[in-house]
Amino acid sequence: MPELPEVETIASQLRGRGVEGKIILSVKINWAPTIEPYSAAQFSKAVKGTTIHEVSRVGKWMMFSLSSGQTLMVHLRMAGSFAMEKGSHDRIVMKLSDELTLYYRDTRKFGRWKLVDDPQVILSKLGPDALTRQFTLKYFSAAMKKRHRMIKPLILDQGIVAGLGNIYADEALWESMIHPERLSDTLTDAELGNLFKAIKQVLKTGVKNRGTSLGDGKTNYRQVDGESGDHRAQVKAYGRSGKPCKRCESILEKTVVAQRGTTFCSACQPRLEQ
């Protein structure tokens, strides 16, 4: 579930907790499949004694640049998170210098850590990060117009734009008043401009509010300190089916688009004939 705002929040908080510049003293791996492509023993040997130079993010990937020249790429998938205190479902425990300990927990065990020599092995497969200068209206419009696909799964495609997930896709489509099943090449220049602005807007707001937590369950997104994200109160569409639209007061509907639960307003976001 963690999308760009949640990953950015965690990366920023780890930087704020002083993880950068710390030496990795030891690694305990409680769920070996988390590590790729190394075995648990190989991974521990490779990172032990290295210094974490930088913690950064591209799309939904968190990156730890190491003094060895390698980069630890972390994808949180459905329920991965980091904490500085011990908890349940800790899959990896990384002891750092200055008595810091980094706990990676993942109730559903879907998250993956990849130790790579060159991060471009992964990043080259991604489209531009949605909050960078490389993600421009010109690029976005051209990418949408040359494809004949439903707009929601298209903006979820990480090879086209990196960072959007189900929550913020629903939010951006609601903000721009576009039906999630509209075909991309039927959108007008004005609609594409509105959607482009909405994507950036909802992601920036999500970052400002430190991410979206949708409940209190163990699989829900948590910040590094264990607190929920504050963005739930700002959500206009996702997870609000059966409730009044905050724009026109029509009842929001839920459907499935490309195997993703999707909430929208049929009054504000009409499905035009295609």
Image: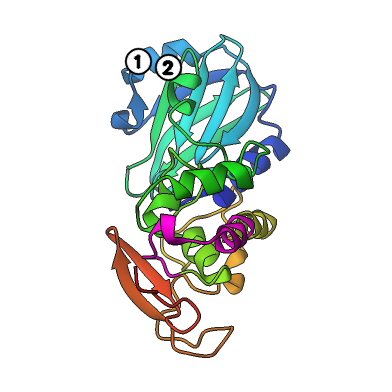
179 on left or right of 5 = left
Residue 44: assigned label: 2
Residue 86 shows in the view:
no
Measuring 56% from the left and 58% from the top, which residue is drawn there? 192
Q: Which residues are magenta?
A: 179-197
Residue 7's x, y, as percent?
55, 45
Q: Which residue is mark 1?
A: 41
Q: Magenta segment: does it hold 101?
A: no
Measuring 50% from the left and 23% from the top, which residue is drawn there? 72
Amino acid type, label 1: Ala
Q: Residues within 10 Å of mark 2 (few under 14, many from 20)?
A: some
Total number of numbered discs in the rendering? 2
Q: Report the magenta stretch's main SS.
A: helix
Q: Secondary structure at mark 2?
A: helix
Q: Secondary structure at mark 1?
A: helix
Task: Give 163 or 225, whichever is nearer the viewer.
Answer: 163
Amino acid type, label 2: Ser
119 on left or right of 17 = left
* Placement of 43 over or under 34, stated as above or below: above
* Placement of 119 over or under 138, stated as above or below: above
Measuring 48% from the left and 90% from the top, which residue is drawn there? 250
* Placement of 250 over or under 10, stated as above or below: below
Which quadrant would the C terminus be assigned to in this image? bottom left
- Asked whether the beta carbons under mark 1 and mark 2 sit within 8 Å of each other, the answer is yes
